[in-house]
Amino acid sequence: MTIMLHLKGILTIDQQIRLVEMCREIATVAPFITPVMPSGQPFNCQQTSCGQVGWTSDREGYRYSRTQPNGRAFPAMPDSLADLAIYVARLAGEQSYIPDTCLINYYPATVKSKLGLHQDNTEVNLSPAIISISIGDDCEFLVGGTKRSDPTKSIILRSGDILVMHGQSRLAYHGVKQIIPNTAPKSLLKNGGRLNMTIRQVF
Ligand code: MD6
Ligand code: FE
């Protein structure tokens, strides 16, 4: 059984605006890129990270790296984001959560924006929760079981929602089926689309 914690609408609009500003600031140091998968196929979303390491995908594989493709370190995780993650981890029953990194995905408001079914298993320690913040347009999110062939169900992730994949759901297959245009709170993202921030304890 897949048990996740879905905190619907837990972030105020002011908190969401501050998170968008945070992502903009992070992107001035670690610009969004469109990574390629090990197969060479580009992702259908743009990515950056903050924290001591950043999630990286290229021809060499999936891994956490201390440096961006441009050779520079990732910007530190802002304290307010780390504090939010520690608070939410507690709600999921994890009392000693260490937020090492936050992967930021941006999905432009196009039909092409999606993320294939996958399992998050690049972390060295696969036990701690992954805390996922949604901002902007609604997203149809698929969640299955721990085998790729398990049936999936759709849930809608809306702006201000936080989803926690922990315990039995930590290794559940999941993906982004579609971004639903023009569903975001007004003037949150000037070109529309969706931001997703996933905070992880890697080690
Ligand atoms: C997204 N999220 O929502 C992509 N992974 O755009 C993920 O891949 C994800 O939301 C692990 C745990 C929660 C997630
Ligand atoms: Fe994931």
Image: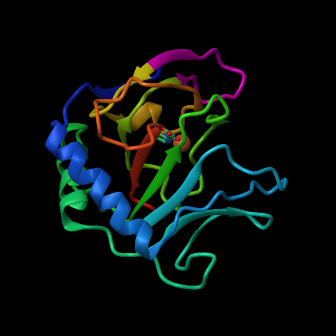
Q: How is the image coloured?
A: rainbow
Please indicate whether residue 19 sits to the left or right of residue 100 in the image: left
In depth, the one of 183 and 140 nearer the eye is 183
Name which residue lies at 41% across and 49% down.
198
Q: Position of residue 14 (x, y in %)?
A: 15, 44
**Vertically, is 145 above or below 76?**
above
Based on the picture, tell me whether residue 146 belongs to the magenta stretch: yes
In depth, the one of 58 and 150 nearer the eye is 58
**Vertically, is 50 above or below 93?**
below
> Can residue 75 be seen here?
yes
Provide the major secondary structure of the magenta segment.
loop
Q: Position of residue 159 (x, y in %)?
A: 32, 32
Name which residue lies at 15% across and 36% down.
12
Q: Position of residue 32 (x, y in %)?
A: 54, 62
**Vertically, is 114 above or below 61?**
above
Residue span colored magenta: 142-155
Name which residue lies at 46% across and 22% down.
2
> Can residue 95 be seen here?
no
Classify residue 168 by image quadrant.
top left
Please indicate whether residue 176 sits to the left or right of residue 136 in the image: right
Q: Position of residue 106 (x, y in %)?
A: 50, 47
Name which residue lies at 45% across and 62% down.
202
Q: Quadrant of the C terminus?
A: bottom left
Q: Quadrant of ligand 2?
A: top right
Please indicate whether residue 140 sits to the left or right of residue 91 in the image: right
Q: Residue furthest right?
A: 39
Based on the picture, tell me whether residue 83 belongs to the magenta stretch: no
